[in-house]
Amino acid sequence: MKKSIAEFIGTFWLVLGGCGSAVLAAGFPNLGIGFVGVALAFGLTVVTMAYAIGHISGCHLNPAVSIGLWMGGRFDKKDLLPYIVAQVLGGIAGAAVLYIIVSGKESFEIGGFAANGYGEHSPDGYNMMSALVTEIVMTFMFLMIILGVTHSKAPKGFAGLAIGLGLTLIHLISIPVTNTSVNPARSTSQAIFAGDWALGQLWLFWLAPIVGAILAGVVYKYLSPEEKA
């Protein structure tokens, strides 16, 4: 239960911090942080939570990460469903708080609400195949980073920083394509509020990250199996 609560809080912060920066600050008149700032914000949420709750739950914050770690032999199958449920609920809670904040402005329009999309809903007009490939490959690399820096033989104390910077880089690459998911919980949380097209395209942002995570779990387990000291 404590681990699930930690995952709920961590994913809440990921969505509120990352998506919040996109909705509230990315296009702020004259001094907007832009997509570079949004990418950094997502990375910072992971870094801060890695050191805050990493020792409690492992700080997955993402169903794809939990699945990838399970495939890589790093996570117990019995904890998989509770983690995923907590992550999705935490993400929705973060999006709900963000909605309450932004709807307090008279000129507020829901718009995309930082949702993920492809085709006409891609930030730069990329089609479904581009989105699918991007999300699979980006999630694959994200899990390769996570599995690598948390390996028993990796340098200690730097995992949170490496993972956060990895997520920042992933956003710098893929925000123009899909608005960057690599996280089904993050995508679900925003799609619920954006509705309509976002819910219709949500399948891709569950399928692609899970496929990428499974592939990474299998590949990394083959390349560098965990060894007992």
Image: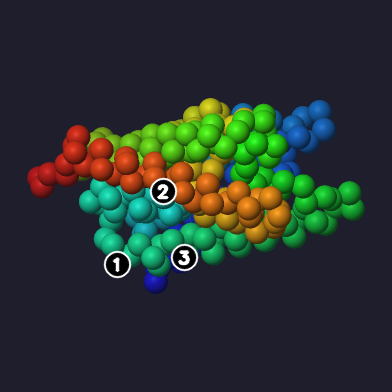
Q: Give the residue type that dot 1 points to.
A: Lys
- The three-letter amino acid code for the residue at tag 2 is Ile
Identity, as a three-letter code, of the amino acid under mark 3: Val
- Residue count near mark 2 (Cα–Cα under 10 Å), binned few <14, some 14–19, many ≥20: many
Counting from the top left corner in percent of width and height, residue 215 is at 32, 41
Q: Which residue bears the numbered disc 2?
A: 210
Q: Which mark is residue 78?
A: 1
Residue 93 in which image quadrant: bottom right
In the image, taking residue 101 as reference, residue 63 lies left or right, namely left
**Relative to residue 222, is residue 71 depicted above or below?**
below
Query: Where's residue 12, x and y in %?
Result: 56, 57
- Outermost residue toward the bottom in this view: 1
- Label 1 sits on a secondary structure element that is helix
* Inter-mark Cα distance, 3 to 1: 13 Å
The outermost residue toward the right is 106
Q: Are marks 2 and 3 in contact (CB under 8 Å)?
A: no
Which quadrant is home to the C terminus?
top left
Asked if labels 1 and 2 touch by Cβ distance under 8 angstroms, the answer is no
Q: Which residue is at 23% across, 51% downward?
A: 73
N-terminal label among 3 and 1: 1
The residue depicted at 38 percent of the width and 34 percent of the height is 141
Q: Circle 3 — which element?
A: helix
Q: Which residue is at 19% across, 38% downward?
A: 222
Q: Which residue is mark 3?
A: 85
Helix, strand or loop under label 2: helix
